[in-house]
Image (cartoon, rainbow, N blue to C red):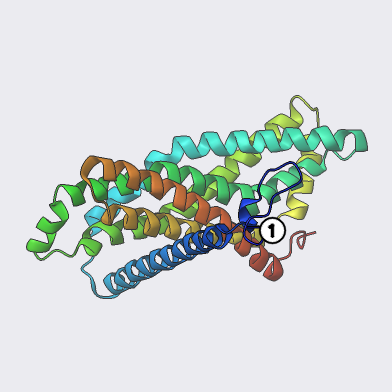
């Protein structure tokens, strides 16, 4: 018994080292292995969708009406959310920066900090996260509803490829709308930071703009556009994949919508880290100065 059951001085057992310990370890390893295999299978499904999308872009029939409709839905109708989010993000960033800079007499540096941060990081990331919640969830819900009501099967029966009709117009619309929305978000964030800096904190506007122009250049805008296009592709691919794989009726639509938002948000945050490292090597921050 002593060899298979180790007890402490107070009589309590250590389950990991008991005779059931190997079984517990096996269950943990099996669960981790299953999760890893499920993740690989999920990546394979995403890769299959990307391959089908690429084939549609090369050989599919252009659908300009659907493309324009998705531009309106993805870009035009997202503007209020993007403007409010970008403006208040820039305002809060400026206020926090000035709280720290003012005792050091570096208030004018707030403009440079906000402009670089909004273009390189906050503008693309915050805008993409908002669109993942608004546009990505809507894509998954719409396509998922078509899946459970057999409308996608009806498209196939009419010799209409679902990727051509449902995914490709959304993909192209996102590639066009996302950079524009990020530029709009960053512009309103910088404008709001100027209002905060020259208003409540009393910073001279000319010095604020001078520092901003000194430390910001075209590379910051280029990084914002690159990140925007990558994030847009992630949102469309992940959200459409969830919609196309919906099962179990209305319950499945709800789960697919939630997964689309969560998976897109996580992908954006993870990919943003690696994009930041890569693009910062090519375009170092502060190079404009």
The residue at the far left in this view is 158
Q: Residue at x 18, y 65 (%)?
A: 161
Q: Spot the residue most to the right.
A: 104
Dividing the picture into quadrants, the one containing residue 190 is top right
Residue 233, relative to residue 250: is it above or below? below
Nearer-the-camera pick, 49 or 199: 49
Q: Position of residue 156 (x, y in %)?
A: 12, 63
Q: Is residue 90 above or below residue 54?
A: above
| Foreground pick, 70 / 230 | 230
Q: Is residue 220 visible?
A: yes
- Give the left or right position of residue 188, taking residue 110 as reference: left
Q: Residue at x 59, y 35 (%)?
A: 87
- How far across and down, in percent of the image, does residue 84 sit? 53, 33
Q: Quadrant of the N terminus?
A: bottom right
- The secondary structure type at the circle numbered 1 is loop
* Horizontal and vertical percent position of residue 174: 40, 55
- Please state which of residues 25 and 216 is positioned toward the viewer in this rendering: 25
- Report crowding for label 1: few under 14, some 14 to 19, many 20 or more residues within 10 A (C-alpha): some
Numbered marks: total: 1
Position of 66 compared to 102: left or right?
left
Relative height, residue 183 to residue 110 (above, below): below
Name the residue that disc number 1 marks. Answer: 217
Residue 110: image location, x then y, percent: 78, 41
Residue 108 or residue 285, whichever sits in front: 285
Quadrant of res 64: bottom left
- The residue at the far top in this view is 200
Residue 72 visible (yes or no):
no
């Amino acid at each position: 018994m002593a060899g298979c059951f180790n007890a402490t001085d107070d009589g309590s057992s250590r389950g990991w080292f008991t005779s059931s310990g190997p079984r517990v370890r096996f269950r943990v390893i099996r669960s981790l292995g299953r999760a890893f295999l499920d993740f690989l299978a999920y990546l394979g499904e995403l890769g299959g969708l990307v391959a089908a999308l690429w084939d549609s872009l090369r050989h599919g029939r252009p659908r300009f009406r659907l493309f324009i409709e998705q531009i309106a839905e993805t870009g035009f109708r997202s503007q209020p959310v993007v403007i409010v989010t970008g403006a208040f993000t820039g305002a809060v960033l400026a206020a926090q920066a000035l709280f720290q800079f003012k005792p050091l007499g570096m208030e004018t540096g707030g403009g440079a900090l906000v402009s670089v941060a909004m273009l390189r990081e906050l503008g693309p990331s915050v805008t993409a996260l908002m669109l993942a919640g608004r546009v990505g969830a809507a894509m998954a819900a719409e396509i998922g509803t078509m899946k459970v009501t057999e409308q996608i099967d009806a498209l196939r029966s009419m010799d209409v490829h679902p990727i051509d009709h449902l995914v490709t117009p959304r993909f192209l619309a996102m590639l066009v709308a996302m950079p524009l929305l990020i530029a709009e978000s960053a512009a309103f964030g910088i404008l709001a930071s100027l209002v905060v800096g020259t208003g409540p904190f009393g910073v001279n506007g000319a010095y604020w703009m001078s520092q901003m122009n000194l430390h910001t250049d075209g590379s910051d805008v280029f990084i914002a556009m690159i990140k925007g296009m990558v994030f847009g592709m992630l949102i469309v691919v992940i959200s459409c994949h969830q919609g196309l794989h919906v099962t179990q009726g209305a319950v499945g639509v709800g789960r697919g919508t939630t997964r689309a938002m969560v998976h897109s948000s996580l992908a954006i945050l993870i990919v943003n880290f690696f994009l930041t490292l890569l693009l910062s090597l090519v375009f170092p921050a502060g190079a404009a100065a």
